[in-house]
């Protein structure tokens, strides 16, 4: 792919639906997300649930407030009670920034909390009026640093307590019962109940919870994990959602938001809802540090894999962990204007990943880290955060030799104290306590699935593997069998020194037969794309480099690999797009589909070759209407986007000034569409693995160098070339497909050069019928009109038709050019003529489409036809 990237930051899609038996998909727990910096706050919606759903934002100095109607439920009287919330704010400009008030201001029956009271050194205080000392509780912590904290105020048997992050900071028993609220009162959040100046709070409040009758906390406690839930005596629970402000209690109070008060995405750093995890960000074009922020330490603390320093406060980097990704501030390391960034998000999940903060024990004792993977540990990355230290790496294939590595250096594996992994613990021996006794650290713990994964549509898929291989020094290097095609790979030479940690992902580019885009994560340099390192396969990857950092003979290399997506699509609009446009001959022209695409087909409506490209082969240009291999347009399309593709150069086949085009875009997903790149071996019975998950019903195979057109198989109804009008030639069934039907995991090839010439590279596109999304089928012509039921609910947006028992073109219809109750526009995949518009070929139907034309090539009586349709 081109080194210079132009990226757009539209959503990568919402969190994936669960797979079989409640299983998670890869899309639920991992994301590579590319975005362009703009120098101001951004929300990155990558579909990963890290933090809670939302909070309420209040602006300083205005009339912002959230008002709750007067109710006897807020007459606390002498009752025990609990008022808790998550709160975040910086230094306040209002002298008495009120986080909440129950009752009228300056009244004997008012209680409340002041945030950043200037009389008490940037602390918070709980007050009650008409008592000799109105401020009953004052925190010892300063809370004006824009950090989320859990604050709880309770009364139990007349004693008031103030807790910050579960730690008791103040008590008071002097507030008499006569001073308590005894009648119905209103409640105001973020301001005093009147418009008196100087009472506005600036910041965020989340999970505001009032319990009348119970003191939940009377001593130190662990702060609530996940969204706060209602208690039997809950009278109000609000500020939990990203888009609405509602009351989750049984009272279901109607809340009034004044001024600019609004619900926003983003809440506490993983503590209040969501699963927690790690966000890793790197500038792609500039020398800048890697930035790692996790939910255990808080969004405002960053680490860098290329540095040994302590965790540092970084308010402008990751600002919150959200229910659908994360938010970033203006920090240049993550959001410099006009610069392209890559982010990788790892969600905490059993059998995938965990983040654990730990404290090193006394000198000479083992450092034990408890985790929740519930499975084999593949690799552990540790960093002491309270003092300067290197990044330790313990990999399952080095543990038996008691060896470790450093993530921030190029050094080889070295001897270490005894280390052991279990499904619940990591024992790192005495090394840390010998050198860092009493210090605080963070551990990123990666699982290793070995047939025990519980992910994907059927809840039985592996999605992460940690292993090693021995180099052979050849460009035909080791073949790594993972059992799945990876989307993210980290590799490091373990038995030698002087080589970098290499990080690659398929969003930035790991093309088969092309240069791989990589970061060297132990330094701060920009990404590189100067050599071929590996080729992706349906079951893993093949090493192609002979460099010392990847494949020196008899050297040992360790790796982590994460699987491509496993979610079965539920809507065709999430995985297929059709768009018409007029060429303008400008370079770097961006097209937005709303999802990351893997393959697209561009046809010239005015007449011309058009072409087809794929992410897996770096967008190499191939035509459907000729028998040529790929041509010189190797930078024809750029795919490193989360939401579409780019035409980097003004090629005539896709962007000639004033010409008309139509483009069709597919995303690879199980049970719907897959792409496989392979090299032929010329032997009968050669099998090629795939990840479609079901037996493909339609297959397009194209030699990337040999002069054969797309070879097409549609079930047992058609075998032939896409660049030909010819009928199906069943006599080549054995030559092409070895007389063997495809299965849910592989296709079988014969010796025919169009699909399996020895040493030739090929690309195969595999299509399947998926309920409500796509349909591969056949029909018999009736010479009049007939409805083709595809099982859709809103009709077909794309239809491909070919006659199989006689000559005919490969006709393509779509809703952008017109599937209407009238004349339709049609193009032929096998030709380069301009589209025809003079016939009423097909009509729309909610279940699929209607064939109207009685001609020989679409609906001749007794004729046999195949079709492919997408809803």
Image (cartoon, rainbow, N blue to C red):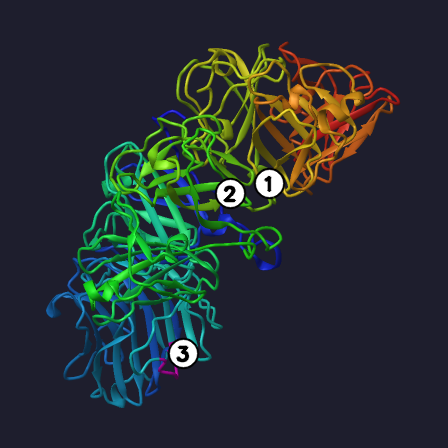
At horizontal 59% and vertical 35% (from top left) the residue drawn is 674
Pick the front one: 843 or 615: 615
Q: CA distance from mark 2 to mark 3?
A: 52 Å
At horizontal 18% and vertical 52% (from top left) the residue drawn is 309
Instruction: Answer with left or right where residue 281 lies relative to residue 776.
Output: left
At horizontal 38% and vertical 32% (from top left) the residue drawn is 517
Q: CA distance from mark 1 to mark 2?
A: 9 Å
Q: Nearer the viewer, mark 2 or mark 3?
A: 2
- Above or below, comparing residue 569 to residue 452 in the picture: above
Q: Magenta segment, which residues?
A: 211-216
Q: Disc 1 designates what residue?
A: 691
Pick the front one: 308 or 230: 308
- Above or below, comparing residue 822 to residue 559 in the picture: above
Label 1 vs 2, first from the N-terminus: 2
Q: Disc 2 designates what residue?
A: 564
Q: Secondary structure at mark 1?
A: loop
Residue 577 seen anywhere in this rendered image of the structure: no
Q: Disc 3 designates what residue?
A: 73
């Amino acid at each position: 792919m081109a080194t210079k990237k132009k990226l757009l930051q539209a959503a990568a899609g919402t969190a994936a639906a669960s797979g079989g038996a409640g299983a998670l998909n890869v899309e639920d727990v991992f994301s590579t997300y590319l975005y362009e910096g703009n120098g101001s706050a951004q929300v990155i919606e990558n579909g990963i649930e890290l933090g809670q759903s939302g909070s309420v934002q209040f602006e300083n100095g205005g009339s912002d407030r959230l008002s709750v109607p007067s109710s006897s439920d807020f007459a606390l009287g002498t009752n025990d009670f609990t008022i808790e919330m998550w709160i975040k704010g910086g230094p306040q400009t209002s002298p008495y920034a009120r986080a909440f008030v129950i009752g009228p201001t300056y009244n004997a029956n008012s209680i409340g909390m002041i945030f950043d009271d200037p009389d008490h050194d940037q602390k918070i205080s709980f007050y009650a009026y008409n008592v000799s000392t109105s401020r009953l509780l004052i925190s010892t912590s300063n809370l004006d640093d824009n950090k989320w904290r859990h604050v709880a105020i309770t009364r139990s048997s007349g004693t008031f307590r103030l807790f910050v992050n579960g730690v008791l900071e103040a008590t008071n028993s002097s507030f008499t019962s006569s001073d308590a609220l005894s009648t119905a009162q209103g409640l105001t959040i973020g301001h005093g109940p009147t418009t008196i100046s100087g009472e506005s709070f600036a910041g965020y409040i989340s999970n505001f919870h009032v319990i009348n009758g119970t003191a939940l906390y009377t001593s130190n406690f662990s702060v609530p994990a996940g969204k706060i839930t209602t208690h039997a005596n809950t009278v109000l629970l609000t500020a939990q959602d990203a888009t609405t402000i509602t009351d989750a209690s049984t009272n279901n109070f109607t809340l009034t938001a004044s001024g600019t008060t609004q619900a926003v995405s983003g809440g506490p750093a993983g503590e209040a809802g969501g699963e927690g995890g790690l966000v890793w960000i790197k500038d792609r074009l500039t020398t800048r540090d890697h930035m790692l922020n996790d939910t255990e330490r808080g969004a405002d603390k960053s680490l860098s894999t290329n540095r040994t320093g302590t965790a540092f406060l970084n308010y402008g980097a990751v600002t919150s962990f959200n229910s659908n990704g994360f938010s970033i501030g203006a920090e240049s390391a993550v959001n410099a204007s006009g610069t392209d960034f890559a982010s990788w998000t790892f969600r905490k999940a059993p059998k995938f990943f965990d983040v654990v903060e730990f404290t090193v024990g006394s000198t000479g004792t083992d450092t034990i880290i408890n985790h929740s993977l519930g499975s084999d540990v593949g690799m552990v990355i540790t960093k002491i955060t309270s003092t300067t230290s290197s990044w330790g790496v313990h990999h399952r294939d080095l543990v038996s030799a008691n060896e470790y590595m450093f993530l921030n250096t190029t050094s080889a594996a070295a001897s270490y104290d005894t280390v052991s992994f279990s499904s619940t613990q990591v024992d790192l021996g005495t090394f840390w306590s010998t050198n860092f006794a009493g210090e605080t650290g963070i551990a990123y713990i990666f699982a290793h699935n070995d047939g025990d994964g519980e992910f994907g549509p059927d809840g039985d898929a592996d999605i992460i593997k940690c292993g090693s291989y021995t180099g052979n020094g050849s460009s035909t290097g080791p073949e790594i069998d993972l059992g799945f095609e990876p989307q993210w790979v980290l590799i490091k030479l373990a038995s030698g020194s002087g080589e970098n940690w290499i990080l690659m992902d398929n969003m930035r580019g790991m093309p088969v037969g092309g240069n791989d885009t990589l970061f060297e994560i132990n330094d701060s340099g920009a990404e590189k794309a100067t050599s071929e390192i590996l080729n992706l396969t349906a079951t893993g990857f093949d090493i192609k480099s002979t460099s010392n950092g990847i494949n020196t003979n008899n050297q040992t290399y360790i790796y982590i690999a994460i699987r491509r997506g496993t979610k079965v699509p539920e809507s065709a609009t999430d995985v297929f797009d059709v768009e018409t446009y007029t060429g303008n001959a400008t370079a770097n022209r961006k097209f937005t589909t709303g999802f990351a695409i893997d393959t697209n087909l561009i046809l010239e409506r005015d007449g011309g070759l058009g072409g087809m490209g794929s992410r897996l082969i770096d967008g190499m240009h191939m035509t459907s209407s000729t028998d040529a291999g790929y041509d010189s347009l190797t930078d024809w399309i750029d795919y490193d986007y989360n939401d579409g593709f780019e035409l980097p150069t003004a090629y005539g086949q896709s962007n000639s000034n004033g010409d008309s085009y139509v483009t069709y875009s597919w995303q690879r997903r199980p049970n719907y569409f897959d792409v496989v790149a392979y090299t032929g071996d010329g032997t009968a019975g050669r099998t090629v693995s795939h990840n479609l998950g079901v037996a493909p019903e339609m297959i397009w195979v194209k030699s990337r160098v040999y002069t054969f057109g797309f070879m097409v198989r549609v079930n047992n109804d058609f075998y032939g070339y896409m660049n030909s009008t010819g009928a199906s030639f069943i006599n080549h069934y054995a030559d092409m497909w070895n007389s063997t039907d495809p299965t849910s995991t592989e296709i079988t090839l014969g010796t025919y050069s169009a699909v399996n010439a020895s040493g030739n590279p090929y690309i195969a596109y595999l299509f399947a019928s998926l309920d409500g999304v796509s349909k591969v089928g056949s029909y018999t012509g009736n010479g009049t009109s007939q409805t083709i039921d595809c099982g859709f609910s809103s009709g077909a947006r794309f239809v491909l038709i070919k006659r199989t028992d006689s000559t005919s073109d490969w006709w393509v219809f779509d809703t952008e050019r017109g599937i209407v109750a009238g004349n339709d526009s049609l193009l032929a995949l096998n030709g380069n003529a301009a589209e025809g518009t003079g016939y009423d070929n097909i009509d729309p139907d909610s279940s699929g489409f209607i064939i109207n034309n009685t001609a020989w090539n679409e609906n001749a009586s007794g004729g046999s036809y195949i079709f492919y349709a997408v809803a």
